Structure formats: C-alpha cells, structure tokens
Amino acid sequence: MGNNLSTESEIRAVLESWAAATREGRSDDVLKNYAADLVIFDVLPPMKYESAETYRRSWDEWQPESQGEATFDLEDVVITAGHDVAFAFCFIRCAGTLPDGTVFHDLVRATFCLEKVNGSWVVRHQHISKPFEQS
C-alpha cells in the first residue's frame, strides 16, 4: 500500500470533519462519513457499537456538555491507504470545562479503518482506547 497525496488528503478531511463535529457538539454531523453498519470499539461502556445509529443514540450519554470552546484535536495522524481500503491511527487530545466549572483533559488512542465506497472514503471501523491505569 502506497500513499498518494490526494488520497491521504481525502482521508485526513474525513477524520478532521469527524473531530470538528465532535468538538463543536454537532451530533448530526459526527457520523456523516461513517458506514451505517460500522463497528465502533469505544473507551467507555458499552465498549462496542454495531451500527452508526446505535452510536448516535448514545451520544448524549457520554458526550460531556462543556462551556466555551472544547478541545478535541487529532495528533500525530498516520495514514496508510491502498486503492479502496485504508487505515489511520493517532492520538486524540480532549479537554474542556464542564458546566460546574470542573476542567477535564484526556489523551486517548484512535484507530480508523476506512473503505472507498462510490468514490468517497467512509469509516468502517473505529477503535478508541486508553491505557489502563493501575494504582
């Protein structure tokens, strides 16, 4: 698999669109470039979603409501793409201020598997994880 700059730009745009929609709380746009039957492994319970609709319905349960500007930034994105399949991985830096004034910040890992369908890249699988902290 070699990377073509145009392909890499298209995939990066899909991922950045997802990050911007998440950061801005635009829940209806979060999954616009996702396959309807995708599988998402998430860092929070239930840990596995088997469709975009199931994930979308859970949005309000886990998406923190924050005051002011939130942080949801993709860092160190690496993309490897073939003709019709690709994968990407990165870190995601999340931060914001909750309505009660509590400031939160986190760093998680993300992996995306994409497929080119009808000329457009869509996410078929997303995996978000965080190292287990032992005390």
Image (cartoon, rainbow, N blue to C red):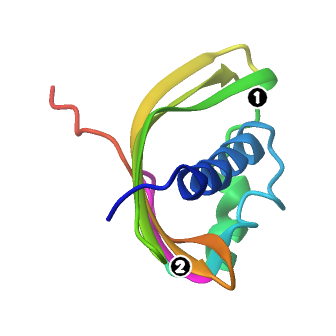
* Secondary structure type for disc 2: strand
Horizontally, is 15 left or right of 68 in the view? left
Give whichever of 135, 85 is nearer the camera: 85
Return the residue at label 1: 66
Residue 37 magenta? yes
Give residue 42's mark: none
* Secondary structure type for disc 1: loop
Give whichever of 94, 89 is nearer the camera: 89
Horizontally, is 20 left or right of 128 in the view? right
**Residue under the point 69% across and 58% down:** 59
Q: Badge 2: how crowded within 10 Å, few (<14), some, or many (20+)?
A: some
In contact (CB < 8 Å): disc 1 and disc 2: no
Give whichever of 127, 33 is nearer the camera: 33
The answer to whether 122 is drawn above or below residue 93 in the figure is: below
Q: Residue furthest left?
A: 135
Q: Position of residue 114 (x, y in %)?
A: 50, 69
Return the residue at label 2: 38
Of tags 1 and 2, which is closer to the observer? 2
**Residue under the point 47% across and 27% down:** 106
Q: Which quarter of the figure has residue 35?
A: bottom right
**Residue under the point 71% across and 65% down:** 31
Q: Quadrant of the N terminus?
A: bottom left
The answer to whether 124 is drawn above or below residue 133 in the figure is: below
Q: Quadrant of the C terminus?
A: top left
Q: CA distance from mark 1 to mark 2?
A: 28 Å
For badge 2, the amino acid type reads: Leu
Find the magenta span and give its range.
36-46
Q: Badge 1: how crowded within 10 Å, few (<14), some, or many (20+)?
A: many
Q: Which quarter of the figure has residue 58?
A: bottom right
Q: Position of residue 38 (x, y in %)?
A: 53, 79
For badge 1, the amino acid type reads: Ser
